[in-house]
């Protein structure tokens, strides 16, 4: 049994909170730049140029790419041969608190959804636990802004709705989102499982690199088909028109009940921040 001290987890979380808000992942940058080269509509091309300039400025000056530094979503893939000393949740929240405070990142979390009082340090984080084989702890921090989160939806389809019903719902969500989630967007989709499992898969799908298609050929083709149809809506970057609305559609799927067909769509703006470290 390998032992990892909770203090080490705090240090990693603290650093990742700052780095994810300052530096856009390489796969996201490459995808944006590729779409800029292929965008024929001048206003859309100009917006993409500004997006590219913005993330270069953020990187060079170690400042946030976006003023909404989001709620801290923390994914912990814990090896079954690992023991973490101390309180894991407290360790994560200490890291978030220190990272957001020292990094001068906006504090966007309210302690109670009805009373709406700001917690003051962007805690608590949204923590997702996953037990995996091995003796490593894989930590992923993915700040999630709510301009895009608010455009996300879930629906419990009937099995009879089938594939066409799944497609129709995903396209409906993107059409209703329009320019609100600061496009170009990445569309995370979870199909199957239960109500909560589908939502988790949709959010987790946003972590898959944009240059990695689904390993299942059927779903890889479905991802590309949906991306093309979403771009045909003509929303374009920041809603100014053009063909660059969706950078990528990432789908995760799982088994489900004979009476159900859950589908969740989690929209992510072009500031698709996430970074992973293995302890």
Image (cartoon, grey):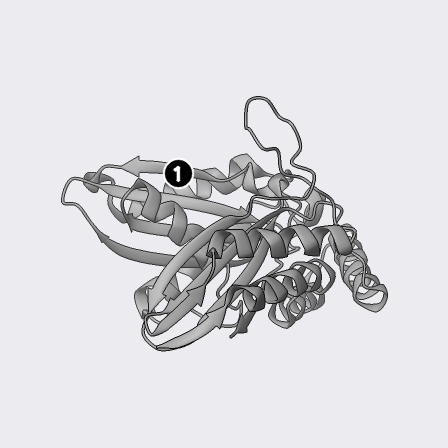
Q: What kind of element bears circle 1?
A: strand
Query: Does residue 51 appear left or right of residue 122 in this picture?
Result: right
Q: Nearer the viewer, residue 274 or 130?
A: 130
Q: Is residue 244 visible?
A: no
Image location of residue 275, percent across then percent down: 59, 66
Q: Residues within 10 Å of mark 1 (few under 14, many from 20)?
A: many
Q: Which residue is mark 1?
A: 154
Q: Is residue 223 left or right of residue 15?
A: left
Q: Quadrant of residue 235?
A: top right
Image point 55% across, 55% down: which residue?
Answer: 92
Residue depicted at 64% across the width and 64% down the height = 16
Front-most of residues 17 and 194: 17
Q: Is residue 28 visible?
A: yes
Judging depth in this view, the residue of 38 and 239 nearest the camera is: 239
Could you tell whether 49 is left or right of 216 in the image? right
Q: Position of residue 132 (x, y in %)?
A: 33, 69
Q: Is residue 274 left or right of residue 107?
A: left
Which image quarter: residue 25?
Answer: bottom right
Q: What is the x, y in percent for residue 207? A: 50, 62
252 is higher (above) or lower (below) than 171:
below
């Amino acid at each position: 049994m390998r032992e990892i001290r909770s203090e080490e987890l705090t240090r990693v979380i603290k650093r990742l909170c700052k780095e994810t808000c300052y530096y856009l992942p390489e796969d996201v940058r490459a995808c944006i730049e590729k779409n800029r080269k292929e965008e024929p509509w001048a206003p859309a091309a100009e917006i993409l140029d500004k997006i590219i300039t913005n993330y270069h400025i953020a990187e060079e000056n170690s400042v946030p790419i976006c003023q909404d530094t989001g709620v801290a979503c923390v994914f912990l893939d814990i090896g079954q041969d690992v023991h973490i000393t101390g309180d894991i949740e407290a360790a994560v929240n200490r890291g978030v608190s220190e990272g957001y405070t020292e990094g001068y990142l906006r504090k966007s979390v309210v302690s109670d959804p009805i009373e709406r009082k700001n917690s003051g340090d962007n805690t608590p984080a949204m923590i997702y636990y996953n037990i995996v084989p091995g003796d490593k702890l894989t930590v992923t921090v993915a700040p999630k802004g709510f301009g895009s989160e608010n455009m996300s939806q879930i629906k419990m389809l009937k099995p009879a709705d089938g594939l066409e019903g799944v497609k129709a719902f995903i396209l409906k969500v993107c059409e209703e989102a329009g320019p609100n989630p600061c496009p170009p967007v990445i569309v995370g989709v979870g199909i199957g499982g239960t109500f909560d499992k589908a939502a988790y898969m949709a959010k987790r799908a946003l972590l898959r690199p944009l240059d990695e298609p689904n390993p299942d050929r059927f779903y890889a083709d479905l991802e590309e088909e949906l991306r093309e149809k979403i771009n045909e809506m003509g929303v374009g970057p920041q809603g100014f028109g053009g063909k660059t609305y969706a950078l990528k559609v990432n789908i995760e799927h799982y088994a489900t009940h004979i009476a159900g067909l859950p589908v969740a769509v989690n929209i992510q703006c072009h500031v698709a921040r996430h970074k992973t470290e293995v302890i």
